[in-house]
Image: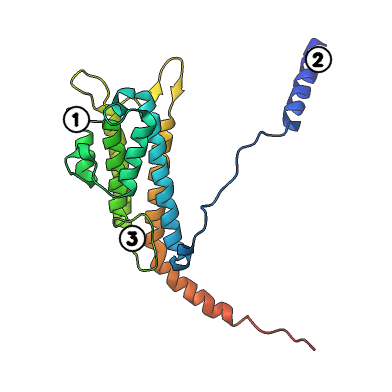
Amino acid sequence: MRVTMMLVLGLAALLSACSTAPGPRGEVRGMTSGGGEMGQSDTNRMATITMRYNLDSLYLLMDKLYRRNPAEWKKTAASREDAIGKVRSTIEQRAPWPGLQGERDIRALSLALRPDFAGDRVAAFIYATADMIIAAHGGKTEFFLVDSLDAQHLYNAARNVEIAVWLLGSRRDANGQPLLLADDIGTGARNLSFEREFGKIVGRLDVLATFMTEKYRRAGINYVQNLIGGGFIQFLPVR
C-alpha cells in the first residue's frame, strides 16, 4: 500500500512538472538593417554579421576578464568602463594599441601572452585577438560585393583563438600565477563562461570558413537550378 501511494504521488508530481509551461528562453534577433545592405550579397551579409557577433563576444569577454582581474584596467583608465571604452574604440578605429609597441595581428597576440608582459594584459589580449580576426577577414569588419574572403585565413584564425585560449590558461607568470584569472573550476563552483564564449567565436569562424569554400560551387549549382526551374514557370490561363 505504501509503495503504491509513493508511485501515485511520484506520478502526480511528474504530471505537474510536465504541465508547467517552460520559462522564457529569449528569441532570435537579427541585426538592424541599413542602406549598405543593397551592396551586399548573402555571403557578404553573413560575414558582416559573423564579424559583429565575434567582436561583441570579445567585448563581453573583456568585461568578464576585467571583473576577475581588476588590477589590469587600472593600468589603462580610471574605471573599468573607461578602459573597456578605450579598447573598444581602438579596435573599431583600427588603430594600434599603445601597450603593444606597434605590433599587430599574431605578433601582438604573442606579445600579450608573454609571461613578462607588464602592461594591461586584458586590453592587450582582447585587442590582439580582435586585430588577428579582422586581419583574417582582409582587414575589414563590413563586407560588400567587391570584397572576397580567404577560407584558409578564417580557418587559421579559429585555430589561433584556440591556441591563445590554451596559452592563457596554461602559462604562468614569474610568481607561478595564471596570466589572467578566467574560468574557475573549484570544489564549490564551476564557471566555464569564458570557455563557452571563446567556443562561440571559434565556431562562427569555422562555419564561415566552410561556407566560403562552398561559395563558388553553390553559385554553379544555383545557376543550374534556376535553368531547370525556369521550365516549370508558366503563366496560368485567365479565361
Q: Which mark is residue 117?
A: 1
Which residue: 52% across, 54% down? 32
91 left or right of 38 in image: left
Pointer 1 local density, CA inside 10 Å: few below 14, some 14–19, many at least 20: some
Along the viewing direction, whichever of 94 and 151 lies nearer the viewer: 94
Label 3 Cα crowd, 10 Å radius (few <14 / some 14-19 / many 20+): some
* Helix, strand or loop under label 1: loop
> For this rendering, which residue is in front, 171 or 85?
85
| Residue 125 image offset from top left, x and y in percent | 28, 36
What amino acid is at disc 2? Met
Farthest front residue? 78
Q: Which labelled disc corresponds to residue 5? A: 2
> Alpha carbon of mark 1 to alpha carbon of mark 3: how far?
33 Å
- Foreground pick, 150 / 86: 86
Q: Tell me which amino acid carries mark 3.
A: Leu
User: What residue occupies the far top of the structure in this picture?
Assistant: 2
Q: Which mark is residue 216?
A: none
Number of the front mark, 1 or 3: 1
Type of amino acid under label 1: Phe
